[in-house]
Image (tube, rainbow, N blue to C red):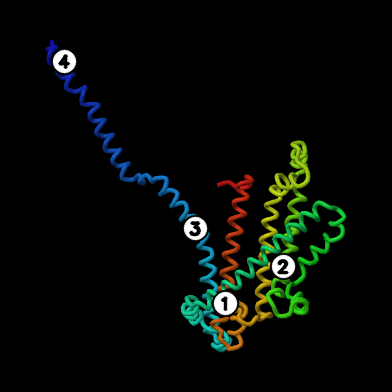
Amino acid sequence: MPTNPSTTETTTESHVPAVPKQADQASAWVSGLDALERRPQLTDAESNLRRWLLKLWNATWPKLLAIAIVIGAWQIVYLSQWRPSWALPSPMAVFEDMATFIPTAEFWQAIGITMQRALTGFALALLIGTVIGVAVSRFKPLRAAIGSLITGLQTMPSIMWFPFAILLFQISEAAIMFVVILGAVPSIANGLISGIDYVPPAWKRVGTMLGMRGFGLYRHVILPASLPSFVSGLKQGWAFAWRSLMAGELLVIIAGQGSIGALMQGAREFNNAPRVLTWIIVVLTIGIIVDMIFKAIDSRLRRTWGLTSG
């Protein structure tokens, strides 16, 4: 049976355009569903903020967990009545004392006096330790003479120096500074000596071929190359200086100088246990903050040297 060509052509023309139309519609539906499941695109600022918050949280939650464990154990010991409350107060009693004492001028004056002593002593120790470290690493006879002495001084408890310091300087700031400097200098000098010893000889030869000699070679090649070990020595030196300072402020009470150690000793004499624990927490907090600063410097150095990524 013959078919009408015009009818066939009309039918074909009516179906051919319908295929892409349905495909477009299906594609639009799929795109719509994907859009519902797809996360919103973040701007660079939002992405950086999210990464910073995640990094902050990863660095903070272990410390918060440690604090929660310590407070929980402290509360359990307090409830067991192992010691009377005037000797071992509850965590809540200490927190209440902190809330009333921290806003006072006396608290911040004590923090200022102690930190001024710590920074002054550490700065002097940094200067002296750097000079000794460079001199010992450069002159072999000097290393043979005092190299072992520096290591021996590093292991000596700082509190052993206080009777001698009091004989030398009486009850004064100089006595505290003397012990703080003696506590920090050996660690700083040893850190620098170790860093200089491990500078690759090829780097020194390159510096020499470029015309560097003496101080120029130390300034542009040796000292920058020894920075990682030097920073480790600085961190250890700060720890010794801080411990020496706390011991000194407890032993050497100077009239009119209401430092952390002096106020803590006064709280102990009045059996004010919450105030004693308040100062212990403050000293611990300062130590953690300084440690975080040194870690940040160390991480930046490692990134600069290509030892870590990111």
Report whether residue 242 is seen: yes
Kindly report the distance in space between the C-alpha atoms of the residues bearing marks 3 and 1.
27 Å
- Out of 86 and 179, give the one closest to the viewer: 179
Which residue is disc 3 drawn over? 56
Q: Earlier in the sequence, mark 3 or mark 2?
A: 3
**Secondary structure of the residue carrying numbered label 4:** helix
Q: Nearer the viewer, mark 2 or mark 1?
A: 2
Residue 216 in picture, x, y percent from top left: 74, 45
- Out of 67 and 249, give the one closest to the viewer: 249
Q: Earlier in the sequence, mark 2 or mark 4?
A: 4
Q: Amino acid at mark 3?
A: Leu
- The image's mark for residue 9 is 4
**Residue 24 placement, left or right of 235:** left
Asked if the residues shown at circle 3 and circle 4 are in contact, with their CB atoms under 8 angstroms apart, the answer is no
Which residue is disc 2 drawn over? 181
Q: Nearer the viewer, mark 2 or mark 4?
A: 2
Kindly report the distance in space between the C-alpha atoms of the residues bearing marks 3 and 4.
71 Å
Kindly report the distance in space between the C-alpha atoms of the residues bearing marks 2 and 4.
103 Å
Q: Amino acid at mark 4?
A: Glu
Residue 108 in picture, x, y percent from top left: 53, 74
Residue density around tag 3, few if under 14, some if 14–19, many if 20 or more, within 10 Å? few
**Secondary structure of the residue carrying numbered label 3:** helix
Q: Nearer the viewer, mark 3 or mark 2?
A: 2
**Secondary structure of the residue carrying numbered label 1:** helix
Which residue is disc 1 drawn over? 279
- Out of 82 and 279, give the one closest to the viewer: 279
At a point 23% along the width and 26% down the height, the residue shown is 19
